[in-house]
Amino acid sequence: MDPARRIVLTATAATALGLVACSSDGGPTIPRAEEACERAEPRCHTLFEAQPGVAVPMYRSHRLDQPDSLIRTAVVMIHGSGRDYDRYFETTVAAARAAGVLETSLLVAPRFRTVDDDPEAGAPYWSSGGWKRGHLSRPESSTPRISSYAVLERLVEEIADRVRFPRLERIVVAGHSAGGQVVHRFAAATALPGVPPDLEVRFVVANPSSYLYLGPERWDGAAFTLPDAEACPDYREWHYGFDGLNSYMRDRDLADVRARLIGRDVRILLGTADTLTASLDTTCGAMLQGRRRLERGRTLLRYMTFVDPSHRHREVLIAGVGHSSRAMFTAPSGRVALFDPGLP
């Protein structure tokens, strides 16, 4: 981790200053400076500096710049196409509160701005589709360019600091709709540099319009076969497949990318009533994955078994829910995906 982005007050320093008490299990307990944030209000808002001169806005439930010995789970929640990170933050808080884990969970919701958000001078922003695909921020933003996936990578790395969060057990990267598209690709793309190997990392993908496929086969109604590439030339393009990769993905070893997507803990959350077409990706490449989001998700699970039966994708059906992030994540099975320990 870049030393410039580390906190100054380590647990050892806090002990020396007399700020540390002992918990019931004998470990250090560091008092918090403030109560958990439960609303998208100014005191809960901050800027995350992903690299010098490049900062993205973010809501957070607890501070990231101070040690916190109570945090066991961290959730990084990615917004949808509306980039309404305030609403997604409050949805994550509602899920944590319902699960009874608000005090022991660090909840963060970053925002990937586009030109439609009227970003201030010198702030990074992306094209309307680029932030979903891990593209570099726009050159017109007058900041060093950075991939949206690199921002997430550095945010996860920041949270994984065991000096700051000594009892952290797991990090969950979650998203709904367009955010779910991001999370599925990010699960494959990132090597998670700086994350301790004993720290559980989970990816929760809810109701996305499309998925990353590891090979050229698509479901034809009876089997996974090769489609007519001339009739559907975009179906293997990034971010449906691995043709036409952007700069972030060109730096990855594709054998590692495939192995990561097969081996990682990925929960596919599907609302059984998400069968309409509002904001649905209807390009040819997406339509080859299925007619609606529910069908596409269930087909993706079958495809992962086709590729490698040992994969760790898990289907989570949420009965009666349509395209609603709040209903998906606050449902009992949605809360389990976000906050309960991983499967063996």
Image (tube, rainbow, N blue to C red):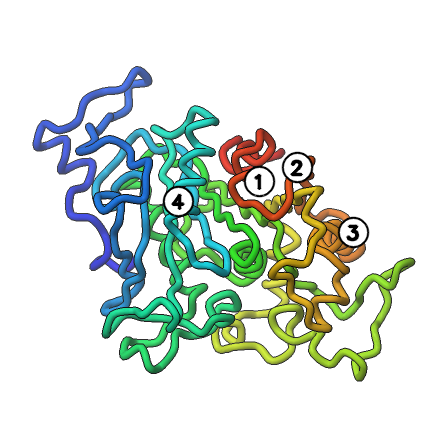
> In the orientation shown, which residue stands out farthest toward the right?
222
Looking at the image, residue 206 lies above or below residue 139 = above
Residue 209 rendering spot, x and y as whole percentages: 64, 59
Q: Which residue is mark 4?
A: 89
Residue 315 rendering spot, x and y as whole percentages: 69, 42
Disc 2/disc 1 C-alpha distance (Å): 7 Å
Disc 4/disc 3 C-alpha distance (Å): 32 Å
Disc 2 or 3, which lies upstream in sequence?
A: 3
**Of labels 3 and 1, the one closer to you:** 1
- Give me the disc on residue 138: none
**Residue 73 appears left or right of 221:** left
Looking at the rendered structure, the number of numbered marks drawn on it comes to 4
Disc 4 or 1, which lies upstream in sequence?
A: 4
Q: Residue at point 63% right, 58% down?
A: 278
Disc 2 or 4, which lies upstream in sequence?
A: 4
Disc 3/disc 1 C-alpha distance (Å): 22 Å
Q: Amino acid at mark 2?
A: Ile
- State the image quarter where residue 343 is shown: top right
> In the orientation shown, which residue stands out farthest toward the bottom?
230
Q: Amino acid at mark 4?
A: Phe
Q: Which residue is mark 3?
A: 302
Q: Amino acid at mark 1?
A: Met
Q: Which residue is mark 1?
A: 328
Q: Which residue is mark 2?
A: 318
